[in-house]
Image (cartoon, coloured by chain):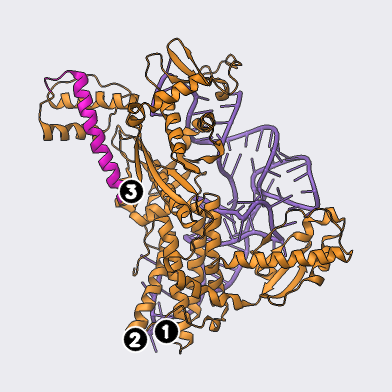
Amino acid sequence: MRFIETMKQDIEERLLKALSLSQKNGEVSFQTLPQFIIEMPKEKGHGDFATNIAMVMAKEARMAPRKIAESILSHLEITGSYIAKTEVAGAGFINFFLNNQWLNDVPKAVHEMGANYGTVEDGLGKKVQVEFVSANPTGLLHMGNARGGAIGDSLANLLKAAGYTVEKEFYINDAGNQIVLLGTSLDIRYCELLGETRDFPEQGYHGEDIKATAKHYLDEFGTDLREKPQAQREAILCDYALKEKLKSIKEVMALYGVEFDVWFSEKTLHESGKVKATLDYLLEKGYAYEKDGSILLKAENSGEVKAPQKESAKGDFVNLEDKDDVLVRANGIPTYFAADIAYHKDKFDRGFDKVINIWGADHHGHVARMKRSVGFFGYNPDNLTVILMQLVKLYRNGELVRMSKRSGQYVTLEDLIAEVGYDAARYFFVMRNPDSAMDFDLDLAKSKTSENPVFYVQYAHARICSILRQAEAKGFALPDFTTVDYSLLQDEHEIELMKKLADLPEEIAEAADSLEPHRLCPYLHDLASSFHSFYNHCRVIDVEEPLRNSRLGLAKATAIAIKNVLKILGVHAPNEM
RNA sequence: GCGCCUGUAGCUCAGGUGGAUAGAGCAACGGACUUCUAAUCCGUGUGCCCGGGGUUCGAGUCCCUGCAGGCGCGCCA
């Protein structure tokens, strides 16, 4: 039930009708009507809705905006609508003041739709894939994964709420150089446990978790690898580690409230020949070429590759778009980029209308060429959206928590959940715009006070549940809230709260459209704030029927809305606190 | 050198796709609990929206440019 949308449409129709009368009467003349908007002004004194129609057409009509507005209003038919009053204001705005009758249906609609209240149908029939986290299975989950997990999962939930069919996917980087290094690192640790020391490669995985994995293997299978050749030892250990790491990632993600629909292995792309097929296709189409045993992807401006612009301390830099990308190395091993092209082709082959990737900002250089690659296969690059998120810094006691895998000073996602709790972790990460580098204040997230934004919202929900418990304890049977008379709710705080409730479908539609789940947080805060304010001004239980039931219904409707939004964000709505 | 992101109140950040007097939380101060959860509410004030140009009825928002910070620019992923 999209109250706001419906009302906007009604106002728009009436406006256009009035405008055509103005034109007919020769009061206003114009050829084409420019784009105009009908919005809800933030300033209360400016009405419930306002439009800039007179201002945007001033030039075309060669007339003062206020004159146009007056002419339109003189023809505006408001009977049979909720419009109570109109005015011309400011530079030529037309403001609409509504009577509040439409609000009576809002709590009713919330109760009728229940857990579905707020959902819209914009995405009906469209299939979207959100790929996120996709952490390397060579290490532990870090803060970047935490941020990506919160954003990705909430975005997927948001898109579902907007009517899309959504699949959540985790891409497992179980091929490539890093896997070779993982095997080497494991083997060295394994051999160390058997009393044989070898030099550890600089690029290897130095973490304690790798030692632990080697130990686990030893505990489980003993020293059976001792006599095997190194390559075989590495392969077996690597395989073992990947299974263990992946299991752990799944467990921590589940702890974090994230369940993926598909776990997609990079290795399978190589094994199934999809990487090879992709390379053949690119060569055949002339997008790529062979050189000295390697295969390179032609850059946008291939053939115009310039010499390095200038000598700099770091050496030779060439503009990315001018540089050919290596797909297969001279040693015959495909690069990660080659596999990624095959992967993205595969995504679109699976029939997704829209593919969304959530990457760390350090991968931004990869975005343009990835989008371009999608186009090689006849897919529209615009259907691939990459959301880049900036880095996360942790603060504890006002000081930056420095992380280093070597020193073991390393806060994992698991640690974070243990320290600040599941709800705060999810809420804090999704609250921020992915575009901005984020400071995560551990003390704030931990604090169980009003300083902590997640508790403010949860408290509103718990409070409502408490009211309903109290009402029942006092022997008031809760009525069917879909049949209660909400026209009794005339207090300004009640009206404010109902308006906020009515707004939810629009909030979801807009947040989904812009792929910005963080926008739900200010809304949620406003909704909770309107409720707390209502609570402090209007008694619920202590008033007589039928007002009591109306207020109980409004409170319950608020709880439903809060819970629905929190669910999208992956945060619990506690019944008591 | 090139590319992406960021710059808004003392602090942390929003800012609905260009609208009217730029917001919220925290911090500070004053009020509200024998009463449905005071993790709450009510009130008090704070801004060269980084600088400089431009686009137009109108710019925190769009364009150009400069400055500052972060990230990246590999036959790593």
Q: Is residue A188 visible?
A: no
Disc 2 to disc 3, C-alpha distance: 42 Å
* Disc 2 secondary structure class: loop
Give the quarter of the image for residue A264.
top left
**Chain of the residue on which disc 2 is drawn:** A
Closer to the camera in the image, A113 or B10: A113
Q: Is residue A172 left or right of residue A200?
A: right
CB atoms of marks 1 and 2 within 8 Å: yes
Q: Colour of chain B?
A: purple
Q: Which mark is residue A225?
A: none
Query: Within 10 Å of the Cα at label 2, are there few (<14), some (14-19), or many (20+) other Cα atoms?
Result: few
Dot 1 or dot 2, earlier in sequence: 2
Residue toward you, A337 or A493? A337
Q: Is residue A241 magenta?
A: yes
Q: In which image quadrant can residue A39 be found?
A: bottom right
Residue A541, which numbered label? Answer: 1
Chain of residue at mark 1 = A
Which region of the structure is painted magenta? A226-254
Chain designation of label 3: A
Determine whether B69 is above or below A227 in the image.
below
Real-space Cα separation, disc 1 to disc 2, in angstroms: 9 Å
For the residues marked 1 and 3, what is the alpha-carbon distance in whole angstroms? 41 Å
Mark 3 secondary-structure assignment: helix
Which residue in the rendered view is the most extreme toward the top? A292
Percent of width and height locating residue A547: 49, 86
Image coords of residue A36 (percent x, y): 72, 57
Q: What number is the disc on residue A474?
A: 2
Residue placed under numbered mark 3 in the picture: A416
Q: Colour of chain A?
A: orange
